[in-house]
Image: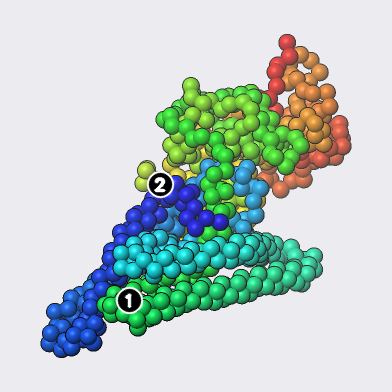
Amino acid sequence: MKPLDPRLIRHTRAIRRLLAGSVAVGIASAACVLIQAVMLADIIASAAMDGARISDLRTPLAALGGVTVARATLNWAGQEFAQRSAATLTVELRRALLRRIVALGPRWAGQQRAGEVTTLAGAGIDGLREYAANYLPKLMLAVIAPATMLVWLATADVVSAATVAITLPLIPLFMALVGWHTERMTKRRWRALAVLSGHFLDVVAGLPTLKVFGRAKAQAEAVRRTTGDYRTATMATLRIAFLSSLVLELLATISVALVAVSVGLRLVDGGMDLRTGLAILIVTPEAYLPLRAVGAQFHASMDGLTAAEDVFAVLEAPARPAGTAMAPDPARTSIAVTGVRVRYADRPVDALRCPDVTIGAGRITAVVGPSGAGKTTLLQVLAGLVAPDAGSVVVGARDLADVDPAQWRAQLGYLAQQPGLFAGTVADNLRLGDHAGGEDGLTERAWLAQAAADEVVAELPDGAATLVGEGGVSLSVGQRQRLALARVFARDARLLLLDEPTSALGAATERRVLAAVRRHAAGRTVVVATHRPAVVAIADDVVVLSAAASDPARSAPHVTESDTSAVATPSNSPAVTLGDMAVGRAAVERVGTGEPAAERVGTGEPAAERVGTGEPAAERLEWALAMSMAPVHGGERRQ
């Protein structure tokens, strides 16, 4: 592990300012030490050898006091500057890390443990503050001060300079030996902390499930065991730190003693005058002091240096180069998806194999397909969060890969399948939209009403000022979904990407929300992934996704017909007939009436018998509906 990682200089500007300031302070401090040593030796020698009185030494004493104050001021200014630079460094590095995580996208994030990434962005980067504020300035001083003292010693006494030159390198040599061993121990400690944090976060998140299945005590034992590993690694690191400090202090003490013995013997036999001898004895410990200080701070900064390795691994992970072209208006320009395929590293088949489709500007397009067909992945591709492994997404005449991602996302409103709410008030979560309140003067209350979230807020003890926990733990899934949808409405987005927006809503609430989506879609392009027939019913177009051909268990049903007007389908795909389409349309028209499903479609027969298959009725109705309510993409018309 390098004392100064060049990657820090590349990724942060604060470290460059800190290095420049530390060098300037180090040079000034070394000069003050030499001046102070010479003046103090002269004052003592004048009083001891020349019989000078206090009145005779007022000017030298005043000058010595001024140099002492200057040295103290430099130390204070250097520490203050280092603390401020360290704070800026951690902010810059954390911002760079978060930006890189966003650039790497969900594909990369899905392969990481949330607890470990959180620890890295929090405690890991905070550990670098100790490194930047204390270790790095002392490292610069350890380079400048000993060299300056050695040059002065060479002009004053060659023997003392040679002794210091021989013994001085022993300290960094032993520091390196100790550091190699400490590095292994610190990495072990950091890994134990990362595992502990990730495990604890996973246990807390899944505690209800663990309680239901009676596994909470077993996980508590696992946390206790991981905590014990972390404690053992910490104590082992502390033992090494204490022993290394002892070794460095012993080396410095012996080295200074060798110089002192040499100077003392020559003072006795008259080979050296008192002024020079005193100055050498004052300067010599100052040559070793910065190295001892670096050794003392080294162990305190090891946590930050170890975490920095992981930070740089993320910062230097390969990612698709960001585009720079101006983003077109997706509400006025169609989006062509051509040959898009996405495959994750841990999956043997494609996560998304999208047919060639065109998403019309200003239209509502429903994306349907079986679970795992890639509906969410398609929305992430459209949002620029996932780069396709093959194919392209063209907005107007521009490939989405060439468009500035910040400009593109500024026009998006994205509702995730599991919407994220953050610790804070309901109003705080709503204001995450860039244009809360809307340009048309609508208030937050109006946005809440549109998403049928006003009922949710009315039931809360403090209304919109009610605090919700991380992830909205105090709210139901449906309540979180409506609040997140209100947040999307509050964002004046030109392209809305909605992932299962009504999956947790009842029929009556769903009708109200979908009516609001339809109204809000005026002048905007909307792409919605869904399994719900009522959602498909409001769509202008439907895109049908099917599972990978190598995964027939997930293959989606396709529309067929006995005559010449049908959508061509693979031979292994289950069929949906025009009779099913009628059934699906009837189901939508009667949804929410409270009648039994069989009566809603006008028959008392089981739905499976009506469609001529044993497949789940709900799935077949959804696909029938997708075919009957809107134009279909995903196949070619037979001639």
Q: How many marks?
A: 2
- Which of pointers 1 and 2 lies earlier in the amino acid sequence? 1
Amino acid tagged 2: His
Q: Residue at x 28, y 77 (%)?
A: 273
Residue 364 is situated, as x and y percent measured from the top left of the image, at 56, 32
Residue 433 is situated, as x and y percent measured from the top left of the image, at 45, 48
Residue 154 is situated, as x and y percent measured from the top left of the image, at 34, 64
Work out which residue is located at the far top of the displayed protein and give it. Answer: 639
The residue tagged 1 is: 271
Quarter holding the N terminus is bottom right
Q: Is residue 527 at least partly visible in the picture?
A: no
Q: Which of labels 1 and 2 is toward the front?
A: 1
Q: Residue at x 49, y 76 (%)?
A: 254
Quarter holding the C terminus is top right
Q: Secondary structure at mark 1?
A: loop
Q: Is residue 488 above or below residue 70?
A: above
Residue 385 left/right relative to 151: right
Q: Residue at x 70, y 22 (%)?
A: 635
Residue 8 left/right relative to 577: left
Q: Residue at x 78, y 20 (%)?
A: 561
The colouring scheme, among rainbow, by chain, secondary structure or one colour, is rainbow
Camera-side residue of 109 and 17: 17
The residue tagged 2 is: 435
Camera-side residue of 269 and 589: 269
Q: Is residue 322 at least partly visible in the picture?
A: yes
> Few, some or many C-alpha atoms within 10 Å of disc 1 (few <14, some 14-19, many ≥20)?
few
Q: Secondary structure at mark 2?
A: loop
> Few, some or many C-alpha atoms within 10 Å of disc 2 (few <14, some 14-19, many ≥20)?
some
Measure how far apart labels 1 and 2 are at the Cα level: 83 Å
Q: Is residue 233 above or below residue 555?
A: below
